[in-house]
């Protein structure tokens, strides 16, 4: 929730930092997917076709969730800023979308918890890489989440409480996975392959297009450095 707390403290600063964090997160997620998760999935499953098919299924699943659950990532602050001046949040529809956003976030965070737990149970360094990827992505995402909820008319206290509840879904997913790990041991390699598709989808579908859409050209080298830096960091960690 650190990203959201920064927004409550310094909104304009948080929004400016958010775009740079997105560049870094995009690099981290691709690094985790290709340098960490993919080699491990191939090692565990031993069949490139099964790994590729599982990753594609993950991409289809996440595409479906985004379409049918209003699961916004990078568009959240942007959508809120397009509310017509003087419109009541309830009339603009942002309040309703904010609740749908929370549902999507809860599911997303639960999946994150499952992936983190499976990664650590498989290999410690794999778990570290996945955790870094989730953290890097969550920081700018939470800045956007808090922005939409505040624009929707939620109080700061309510925004904090609701985001804390949805964030707790990560812990729930991790704990459940930990305790049922012996029963799903045969499926964990496919969960890793599924995570490959998840991280690739988020980076290429959500994060990178947002950088191209919103970033100013004078910061191109900064975004490039952060993007490559994210990949290098994962390469160094693993």
Image (spheres, helix red, strand yellow):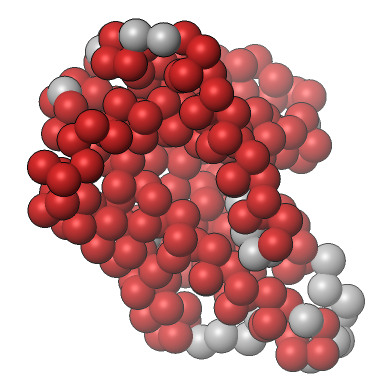
Quarter of the image with the N terminus is bottom left
Quarter of the image with the C terminus is top left
* Residue depicted at x 58% and y 58%: 144
The quarter of the picture where residue 172 lies is bottom left
* Residue depicted at x 78% and y 81%: 93
**Viewer-proximal residue, 233 or 52?**
52
* Residue depicted at x 36% and y 57%: 110
* Residue depicted at x 28% and y 56%: 173
Q: Position of residue 126 (x, y in %)?
A: 24, 23
Q: In the image, is residue 57 above or below residue 155?
A: above
Q: Tell whether 49 sits left or right of 79.
A: left
**Viewer-proximal residue, 206 or 58?**
58
Residue 36, visible in the rendered structure? no
**Viewer-proximal residue, 42 or 210?**
42
Q: How many marks?
A: 0
Q: Position of residue 42 (x, y in %)?
A: 36, 11
Q: Position of residue 5 (x, y in %)?
A: 40, 64
Q: In the image, is residue 189 above or below residue 198?
A: above
Q: Position of residue 168 (x, y in %)?
A: 29, 66
**Viewer-proximal residue, 85 or 120?**
120
């Amino acid at each position: 929730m650190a990203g959201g707390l920064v927004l409550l403290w310094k909104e304009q600063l948080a929004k400016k930092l958010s775009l740079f964090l997105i560049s870094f997160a995009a690099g981290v997620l691709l690094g985790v997917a290709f340098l960490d998760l993919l080699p491990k999935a191939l090692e565990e499953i031993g069949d490139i076709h099964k790994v590729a098919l599982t990753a594609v299924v993950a991409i289809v699943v996440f595409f479906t969730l985004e379409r049918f659950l209003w699961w916004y990532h990078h568009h959240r602050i942007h959508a809120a800023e397009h509310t017509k001046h003087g419109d009541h949040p309830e009339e603009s529809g942002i309040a309703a979308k904010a609740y749908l956003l929370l549902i999507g976030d809860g599911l997303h965070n639960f999946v994150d918890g499952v992936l983190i737990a499976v990664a650590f149970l498989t290999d410690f360094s794999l778990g570290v890489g996945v955790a870094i990827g989730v953290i890097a992505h969550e920081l700018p995402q939470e800045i956007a989440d808090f922005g939409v909820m505040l624009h929707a008319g939620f109080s700061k206290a309510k925004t904090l409480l609701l985001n804390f509840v949805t964030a707790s879904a990560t812990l729930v997913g991790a704990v459940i996975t930990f305790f049922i790990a012996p029963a799903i041991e045969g499926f964990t390699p496919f969960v890793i392959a599924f995570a490959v598709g998840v991280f690739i989808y988020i980076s290429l579908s959500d994060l990178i297009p947002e950088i191209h859409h919103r970033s100013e050209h004078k910061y191109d080298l900064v975004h490039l450095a952060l993007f490559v830096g994210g990949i290098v960091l994962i390469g160094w960690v693993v």
